[in-house]
Amino acid sequence: MTADGSLPPLTAILDADAASRAGWPLLDLATAYLRGGARLLQVRAKAASGASFLEAGLVNLNSLPDRAAQDAVLRALFDPKEGAGFSVMKTVIGATDFQAASEDWYTYDDTPGDTRLSHFSISRDLGPNGLITYIKRARQAGGEFQLQAPMDYPPDWMLYDVESNQSINPAYYSVLARYFVKYLKLYEKNGVHIDYLSPFNEPGTYTKISFAQIRDFIRDYLGPALAARGVTTRIQFSDIGSRADAADNYPSILDDEMARRYIAALPYHGYDWAGWDRITALQAQYPDLPVWMTEICCAVDQTSGMKFESGDFWGNQIFSDMEAGASAWIYWNAILNEQGGPWLNSPIHGDPDPNSQNSVVVIDSSDHAVTYTGLYYYLAHFSKFVRPGARRIATTGAAEGVRAISFQNANGSRVSELMNSRPEPADVQLDWHGLSLRLTLPGTSITTIQWDG
């Protein structure tokens, strides 16, 4: 897909048949970029790319008057044949800034002092705008994805004081571990398995808990609680707010062997817009643990994001994270309206008003027009063609304003993603073991080249 719309959605693919018709030599393996050698690098986690399930998304989806139109949007996001095939998604545990089906802040047990969790309930998530409803509808639309779940805050009564000291009282650590277990068990009972639990989202920004305290909580409470109750969900340390924070703080956590045995992946957020070399070094230091980029958004406003050209920024983010070693790339809001909402307002919990953000899909609240943003197309080129279990093929070479990254999928197919950030076309040549493919990349475009195994 290009800026001038000359290619239909998700058809900028040069497969073996197309290459043959164009008179180009067929390549029997995925390409190294611009005359480089190549080697295979395992993408560790069986996940690729996607976005987040949030109530605001389903509120907007349900605003479409026709169920067929709603299902078409879901297929565009989740169906691996007809749409983008998102293969890893974030859901959330309790309220966040876009859990906006109603205006009230909530957790799953807001009864003060309920240490027995007698009032624990996920009933909101089962409603018409609820997260379980959203997840099930995505699966019905063809979705095949893993789920990752972080939490902004536990119930207020587990904190020392929500107004003045939002640290968790350690006396409630065992209760909080049971809180997570109940969440996972009830979701499972209602047909939704959470693959990865990330107990805290951006700790210090939301819940005021230190990395050392999270380590102790996982090691002494959460890990043993999940094991004792036969919960198969794996634990990610927590969603760290930036690449730099992840690189600076993970080593002191992972050097504790008792804590490390419970940790299956290392999430980080991309809000520093830099620091990919730090992620590369972190992955090299702990090669047995996959790193995931689990949240990013808000680099452009909603109106600008609706233009195809805005996708180039996000494409560069995806390229940089995957080149650094990330096994998953997750955007924040999947669906919002043209105003970048609705959002939940709870300043005490770090959720301001206004809080307009940009999304993958935009549904206009007035005329119900559906817009697939530039981000959608760039992200879809990865999620649709780089499938879970892919191995990354190192690529070398350089061309100004052009980037390339290659993968071998588990089914044997090979994929190269080529991105041209220049406004004018770029002529490139891809070589592999003496075979070459020459093509012209349109200005401001992303192109997927795929060969069957």
Image: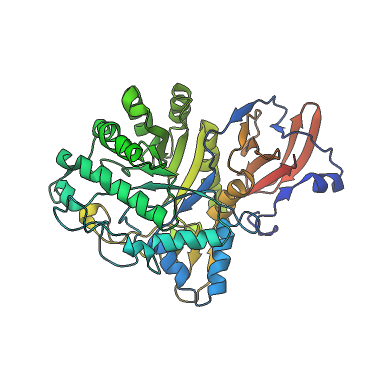
Q: Quadrant of residue 250?
A: top left
Side of 343 relative to 29 (left or right): left
By what rule are the colours in the image chosen?
rainbow
Side of 341 relative to 203 (left or right): right
Q: Would you place residue 60 above or below residue 93 in this image?
A: below
- Provide residue 196's location: percent of width, then percent of height: 42, 43
Q: Would you place residue 410 above or below residue 154 in this image?
A: above
Side of 449 relative to 370 (left or right): right
Image label count: 0
Image quarter in which the N terminus is found? bottom right
198 or 292, nearer to the observer: 198
- Provide residue 184's location: percent of width, then percent of height: 36, 49
Q: Is residue 119 visible?
A: yes
Side of 367 relative to 121 (left or right): right
- Provide residue 52's location: percent of width, then percent of height: 44, 53
- Provide residue 433's location: percent of width, then percent of height: 78, 26
Image quarter in which the C terminus is found? top right
Q: Quadrant of residue 72?
A: bottom right
Q: Residue at x 70, y 57 (%)?
A: 7
Q: Is residue 206 visible?
A: no
